[in-house]
Image (cartoon, rainbow, N blue to C red):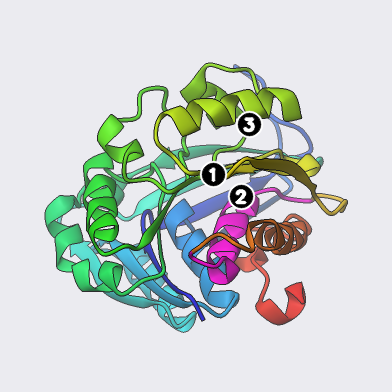
Amino acid sequence: MNKVTIVGSINLDTNLRVQRMVKPGETIHGKEHYTAAGGKGANQAVAAARAESDTRFIGAVGNDAAGEEMLDLLKEENIDVSKVEIIENEATGQSFITIDDNGENAITFFAGANYAFGPEEVAKGSTLIETSDFVIAQLETPIEATIKAFEIARKANVKTILNPAPGESDLPQELLQVTDIIVPNETEAETITGIHVKDETSAKEAAEKFHELGIEVVIITFGAQGAFYDYNGYNELVPAFKEKAVDTTAAGDTFIGTMSSVLKTDFSNLKEAILYSNKASSLTIQRFGAQPSIPFKNEIK
């Protein structure tokens, strides 16, 4: 059982199903409205926990009903939330998600308490990080907090996984230098490297850029096509499992969290871990909502 610590975001998701995406200045009818637990960090934690990892979380919520509900849901997943800060005078983060009949989504993210914790709060969770196999972070929380977490991990020989989402073109060198694995989608890979990633050849070019920045393992997710990896002179596109998507929310988060649960710290089973994660994501896209759609280990098997 891998020990996985996530430094990241916790959100209340408000979901609206529509026939098609709204155009600027247009008003359309929604088909269904519901709320669910979300946030990239929390989604990845739930994916790791349901894949039966020993999962811990470092982050923040507001002192409000949404924050209390989100923490309760994480506890139900047997996730250690002892180092999740409750921030006074801040609202718990929220995402507003629109999903059309093709399963595509558009997301607006309000950070709230997710941006109200930093290196000092991360340092309080140093023991969790130092006793982990993997530490995962995204870009929905302050980069300074992520750098601190990855620096603690690097000193303890703990492997780090960066999900650079939402995509930013100017990631600090001090973050990249302490990142072992980077997992962008094709759009995020292009944002960071400047290379238009559309196939295996361009993915290889982008991977070389990431290697030049000091990152050992590059995994670029291609949605319905699968995931491309480049590590130690080997690269390959591992195909996705073809399923009809009803909601792609949390598919990438499921991939990362699930992968962290089975990947060996020497990366010797990288392809097998990606294949396993592709299976998990293929289940996620067949269900609605972020965390409600994430599968358990027995379903993946």
Q: CA distance from mark 2 to mark 3?
A: 12 Å
Q: How many marks?
A: 3
Viewer-side label of 1, 2? 1
Label 3: how many Cα within 10 Å (few below 14, some 14–19, many 20+):
many
Which of disc 2 and disc 1 is earlier in sequence? 1
Quick one: 30 or 265, which is closer to the camera?
265
> Is 207 rendered above or below residue 136?
above
Q: For residue 252, which numbered disc appears in the image? A: 2
Which residue: 58% across, 17% down? Answer: 195
Q: Magenta segment, which residues?
A: 246-265
Task: Find out whether the residues at labels 1 and 3 contact each other: C-beta distance under 8 Å.
Answer: no
What percent of the width, then of the height, locates residue 207?
Answer: 57, 31
Task: Find out whether the residues at labels 1 and 2 contact each other: C-beta distance under 8 Å.
Answer: yes
Label 1: how many Cα within 10 Å (few below 14, some 14–19, many 20+):
many
* Residue type, numbered disc 3: Glu
**Left or right: 156 as drawn, with respect to 181:** left
Q: Residue at label 1?
A: 183
Mark 2 residue element: helix
Q: For residue 186, which numbered disc appears in the image? A: 3
| Residue 297: quadrant of the picture | bottom right
Does the stretch in magenta take in 69?
no
Does residue 199 show up?
no
Task: Find out whether the residues at labels 2 and 3 contact each other: C-beta distance under 8 Å.
Answer: no
Label 2: how many Cα within 10 Å (few below 14, some 14–19, many 20+):
many
| Residue 107: quadrant of the picture | top right
Does the stretch in magenta take in 259?
yes
What percent of the width, then of the height, locates residue 213?
Answer: 40, 30
